[in-house]
Amino acid sequence: MNEMENPYIDWDVKFDEALKMEVPEAKFSKFSFSGIGGSGIIGDIARIFFPEIGNSLEGNETLLAVSYSGNTSETIEDVKRAIQKGSDVIIITSGGILGKFAKEKGIKQVTVKAGSQTRYSFPYLITPLLKIVSEKTGDKLNLERLALGVKEKKDEIVKEGTSLANLVMGKIPVFYSSRFLGIAKRYKQEVNENAKYPAFYGEIPEVNHNEVESYVHGYNLHPVVIYSSEIDSITAEVLHATLVKGFYDDDLMNVSSLMMIGGIMSIAMAESLHEIPDKLYNIPRARELTSNLFKPSSIL
């Protein structure tokens, strides 16, 4: 796949576009999050900067509901419960059922560019969410650094992602991290969805007390540790893992560049396996069955 076809290569442009998007003001400074899959990763990454963002709906809070398609059944259910509890709701979506519902009921929303896969649209989803939280809490993040993290090291990012793909091909990659656990989880998902290839992830330091023993006999695993603190280095040393480190001393720049490395890696793996990255086989069927279970159209 050349640069024109690579869905991650223009993330610097997407971050710049996302930064210009207007966002609504949150009513409450207490936040909870709803999202699943590629949209769910947005909450995991946001907690790197705002660990107080919760998962439960308790009322008197602002629910940040992220669904790129707008049709995610689980997120629709959370929005319904939040409204019933009297919570403030902000929806980030490209449209779908949630977009229609927000428009008809006057619920605050951020409408992002449609027509892509959720995993390719990370810049459009994470930027407005971080802007909403930072503006309400007063902890103003310099979100321009998200684009800078990709711009300043793009060649190195492509090289690192391609190299990582070559290292894990033929084995089952297992991605680990502590503070950057959301990035490890996203690497796993990228490999699953783009390359149609098995991959797993684990949380440091928890894995140091159990999972590291599963490597005694080798098997066919390739551990990859995404560095965020010294505890990650311990796991990497014990497992003789491939260590992936950010290029910068800035968390925002490291998050954008590390996330892009995972995308590049998965595209390179898809090319090796002659897979079409954005073609999905089993996920649509799972979504259909889930939709039938929740009957999300009842929100309207």
Image (spheres, rainbow, N blue to C red):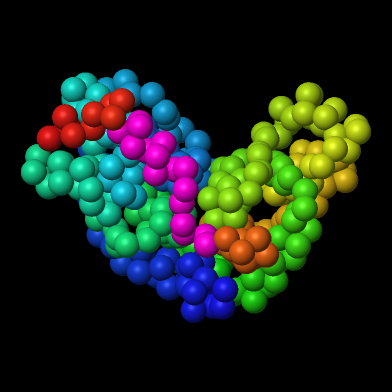
Q: Which quadrant is home to the C terminus?
A: top left
74, above or below 264, in the image: above
Q: Is residue 277 magenta?
A: yes
Residue at point 57%, 60% (across, down): 275
Residue at point 67%, 64% (across, down): 272
Residue at point 40%, 39% (across, down): 285
Pick the residue in front: 230 or 267. Answer: 267
Pick the residue in front: 200 or 106. Answer: 200
240, above or below 2, in the image: above
Specify the quadrant of the image occupied by residue 21: bottom left
Specify the quadrant of the image occupied by residue 265: bottom right
Q: Is residue 290 magenta?
A: yes
Q: Which quadrant is home to the N terminus?
A: bottom right
Q: Which range is magenta?
A: 276-291
Q: Is residue 49 visible?
A: no
154, above or below 107, in the image: below
